[in-house]
Each structure stands twice: as structure tokens, then as C-alpha cells.
Image (cartoon, rainbow, N blue to C red):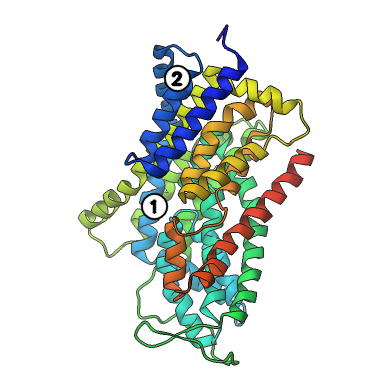
Amino acid sequence: MEGISGAQMLIALGIGLIVLILLILKSRLHVFVALIVSACIIGLAGGMKPNDVVTAITSGFGGTLGNIGIIIGIGVMMGRLFEISGAAERMARTFLKLFGKNREEQALALTGFIVSIPIFCDSGFVILSPLAKALSRQTKKSIVGLSIALAAGLVITHSFVPPTPGPLGVAGTFGVDVGRFLLMALAVAVLPTIACMLYGKKLGNKIHQLPGESGTWIRPPKEQSQAAVLSDDAGKKLPSAFLSFAPLITPIILILLNTVLSALKQTGTAAAVLIFLGKPVIAVTIGLILAAYTLPVHKTRKDLITEMEESIKSAGIIILVTGAGGSLGQIIKSAGVGNYIASGIAATSLPIILLPFIIATLVRFVQGSGTVAMLTAAGITAPIVAAAGGNMILAGLAACSGSLFFSYFNDSFYWVVNRLSGITDTKEQIRVWSVTTTIAWAVSFIELLILDIFM
């Protein structure tokens, strides 16, 4: 890129990002197309030759997806099997039994934390909200506190932990080991979940709402109840706890074994087999096979395949956006913008992880989708962080953290949580969910700033 000034590259990047935001907000074009158009503008305005722009876009798309695209497809199929078989509900009931009476919020938060790893948070909340309502009805605890605990657990792991498609795409874009990313993500996700759960319990005391009859909601004076925790005889044939957890826990254990054995440079036949089985593509495939043969046992082969094919439709757009984010990142790298910005940031004392965090926060605020926000931020900043020598795992997690910022009207999950909890007043909706996600956003980023000091 000889003869191209840093000012020209920055102007090209600025124009491209402005066009990207305008296309997402104002045009009829999908975010996938908007990302490709923005990549073209940045490349051409930044001085790249047209053929080089096309090459960078295609190589960035394919290079980012690679195995990630396969895992996303397998992951959504497995998530669908958890839904139709009742395995997700069985997990919730298992945690309720383990935690016991008066710890319903902790049980629901942990349920959401685990369930959202294979299942989209919207689906998970729809599936499990009847359980939260039943608990509210029996214990006289406000549905607000119970729903916040469940929804927070769901959205936080949905935003941080692979093999959820968004974080998986971020890990691929930043080029980091999925097992290491998963370990760090799980660790980072714990405190925000606890903080949101505690906020939910406090808000539940202020907004004391209970489910009434036939879909109605009532707000009686808060009273004590000796009602027992929801019993396990819901009239449904649910899979056992062992079968419900096995397809989820097995791939996680295999991926972690792969990471540990590879880090320790273990050799030998047993280690080689475990390392192979722990490759994310293989591990998640094993989880899907387990789920298909042990969970929906009452489904016919034809119905099962139809359900999995339906689930793939939801994966398509995630795969396209992930690939397009990789294209944008490759353009920024090839045009030299990344190196130029990185050298400028390196000359300051600002932590490099601020960049993906801020961009994800802004994208989240203007267009609502946390997945799009984290993938867009990853595509833009991965080459910059790499050029600056920053910690790629922390930068990826910073993009995930930024995507949690202030969920409101343009986020579908905002409506899912509030409507299924019977919250219709706008001010209360913001207190119930917008404030909750902002707490998760702030707590998680403080964690990352502290980790950035020591890593």
C-alpha cells in the first residue's frame, strides 16, 4: 500500500463505517449485504485495487467461517432437539431440586446459564417461562425477580460462551482457540449473572407481580407463602437428567480436554484420540449424535430430520453475518488501516480492548442485535488488535461484553422477556430488562479491564 497516507486510510474507514450504520438503520438491505458494501468502500477508498478488494472479501469470508460454519449448523440442530424433547425443562427442574426452597432465583439463573449454551436465549426463555410462572404462583415471589434471573442467565452465556453462534464467530474472527475462549468466557460470565440476579431480586420486591388466571396478571400485597418448590409431576414425559445433560456436557468436556492436552503437548495414542475428539467440530457432532439418539425418542425419523432442517434456517443468517464480518476484517487488514490505528493506540496508555468494546456497544445501541454487534466489532477490530499485539481472547470477550449494552425496543429479547412476564409499562420494561443488561455490560467489562492488567 505504498503512497497511501494514514489520513486517507482513516477517512476510508470512517466513510465505510458511516455507510454501514446508515445501511443497517435506514436501507432495505440486510446487515450481511451492508457489511459487504462497507468492506468494498473501505478497500477502494483506502487505495486498494479492485481485484485485491474482491480477493480480500472472499478470503476473509471463507477463512473466518472454516470450521465455525459447521459448528454453528450442528449447534442449532442440537438446540432444537433440546427444545422439542423437553431436555431444557428437565435441566431447570433438576436445578430447582438441587437448590431447594427459597432459592428459586439461583436455580433459574443457573438454568439459563447452562441452557443457553446450546439454545438461543429467545427460545430458552419461551420454553422455561411457564416454569417461572408456576414458581411465582406457588411461592408468591414476584415474576419480575424470577424472570430477570432466568433471562440474565440465558442472555449472558448466549453473549459469551461458545458454541453459541455469536461468541463462536467472534472466536473465529479473532483466530483464538475455542477451548481457551470457552474457559475464559465461562469465568467472565459468572459475576454478571450473579449481579443481575441480585438486581432482579431487589426489583422483584418493588414490582410485586404474580400470574393470575387465564393469562392475567395481579399485583397483590407481598405475602409470605409456605408453598413447596414446583413438583416434578408436570404431566409431561421428560427425558432423565442424565440424558438431558449428556449431549451438552460431553462436547464441553471433550473441547476442554483437547485444550489441556494440547497445551501440555501430550503425545501417545490416548492423548491423540482425545485431542481429535476434542476438536470443536468433532465434539459438537458427538453431542448432536447423542441428542438425536437419546432425547426425542418418541419422534419418528422423518419428523426428527424435519425439525433439524427447520432449525438450520435460523443458522443461515448467523453464518452469513459471521463470514461478512470476516470479510470486513480482512479488508481493514489488507488496506493497512489496522496497522495504522494500532500504532496510534500503542502510543497511548489506553487498553486496546476498549476498541472492540466501544464498537460493539455502539452497534448494539443503534440496531439492537447483540450477535450482529459482537460480530461487527470483531470484524472491524481483530486486525487492529493483532497489529497492536493485544490479547486476542480478551479483545474477543470485550466485543461480546459490549453487545450486552442497554437492550431496548429494537431488541427482540426485550419484548420476549417483558411480554412473557406481563410487564407492559415502558418505564417498568426498561427497569426490568434494559437496566439488567446494562449491569451485565458494565460488570463484565470491569472484569476484562482487571484481567487485561495481569494478562
Residue at point 60%, 92% (across, down): 224
Q: CA distance from mark 1 to mark 2?
A: 33 Å
| Viewer-nearest of discs 1 and 2 | 2
Between residue 211 and residue 274, name the one nearer to us: 211
Residue at point 68%, 59% (across, down): 191
Q: Can you say whether 174 is above or below 231 in the image?
A: above
Between residue 263 and residue 403, name the one nearer to us: 403
Q: Position of residue 129 (x, y in %)?
A: 44, 72
Which image quadrant for residue 99? bottom right
| Label 2 crowd (10 A; few <14 / some 14-19 / many >=20) | many
Q: Is residue 215 left or right of residue 140?
A: left
Q: Can you say whether 240 is above or below 401 in the image?
A: below
In the picture, the disc for residue 78 is 1
In the picture, the disc for residue 56 is 2
Q: Amino acid at mark 2?
A: Ala
Q: Amino acid at mark 1?
A: Met
Q: Is residue 284 left or right of residue 106?
A: left
Q: Secondary structure at mark 2?
A: helix
| Label 1 crowd (10 A; few <14 / some 14-19 / many >=20) | many
Is residue 3 visible to us here? yes
Q: Quadrant of the N terminus?
A: top right
Q: Residue furthest top?
A: 2
Q: Secondary structure at mark 1?
A: helix
